[in-house]
Amino acid sequence: MALRQPTFWTAPQTYLLLGGTALGYALLMVLVGPRPVAGLAGAGVAAAMVGSWAVGFRPDAVTASGSDLLDDRTFAAQLASLGQRVPAKSQKAWREVQTWAIESQRFAARIYDRDPMLQVELLEAMHTVLDLSGQVADGLAVIDQIETPAYKQMAQQRLAASRDRLQATYAQLQQLQDQLALSTLDDNSSDPLPQRLQTLIDANKTILQDDRDLS
């Protein structure tokens, strides 16, 4: 599921502009009376305003910038870019992580489909999923290049922490998606969905920050 890209005729600003323009034109006719010159001038101004909006219309910034990680193609493209860092001999381990990331995005998209008000939290969650995936990709790329036992152990621990967090994110988003699909969140938990998502995001950020602190 992808976010719908707004068009000129679906953007709410279009209808506000058309309504305001029509109201202004009607008031002009009331004030000056049915004079042809005033009518033509008013119509010209109204047409110029609508035409200017139509020419300058741009899709939503999130969609236009290609950063809509709730769109499966956008997410897959960015994940594939991370996968290019992984050496051939580590592809098996990467495919497992890739599956967790892709499934996490699918669950997030389904949650958004049912509750669009969660867009901000879901996008942030997907950004952390990509960041964790990047950590795994980098870890797989360098771990065999480290020869000192102490540093090799440290690299393995960091890699395992990122992997485990991705797997946990996958499982948690699956649970949230299933619960929301069954409409049982309110009955089975006192914690609202936004709070659960924020807890997930915070846990992901903790792993990401720990990795940065060790770098």
Image (spheres, rainbow, N blue to C red):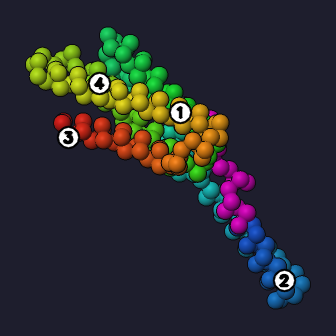
Calculate the distance from the C-alpha at mark 1 to the C-alpha at mark 2. 60 Å
In this picture, which residue range is highlighted in magenta? Answer: 1-16
Question: Dot 3: few (<14), some (14–19), or many (≥20) neighbours within 10 Å?
Answer: few
- In this rendering, the label closer to the viewer, 1 or 2: 1
| Earlier-in-chain disc, 1 versus 4 | 4
In percent of width and height, residue 101 lies at 45, 28
User: Disc 2 designates what residue?
Assistant: 29
- Residue 21 appears in the figure: yes
Residue positioned 74% across, 72% down in the render: 21
The amino acid marked with disc number 2 is Met
Residue positioned 50% across, 34% down in the render: 173
Residue positioned 73% across, 63% down in the render: 15
| Earlier-in-chain disc, 3 versus 4 | 4
| Earlier-in-chain disc, 3 versus 2 | 2
The secondary structure type at the circle numbered 3 is: helix
- In this rendering, the label closer to the viewer, 2 or 4: 4
| Earlier-in-chain disc, 2 versus 4 | 2
Residue positioned 82% across, 76% down in the render: 40
The amino acid marked with disc number 3 is Asp
Q: Of the numbered discs in the image, which one, if any, rests on residue 213?
A: 3
| Earlier-in-chain disc, 1 versus 3 | 1
| Earlier-in-chain disc, 1 versus 2 | 2
- In this rendering, the label closer to the viewer, 3 or 2: 3
Question: Dot 2: few (<14), some (14–19), or many (≥20) neighbours within 10 Å?
Answer: some
- Would residue 160 appear left or right of 199 to someone viewing this image? left
User: Disc 4 designates what residue?
Assistant: 160
- The N terminus - image quarter: top right
Calculate the distance from the C-alpha at mark 1 to the C-alpha at mark 3. 31 Å
The secondary structure type at the circle numbered 4 is: helix
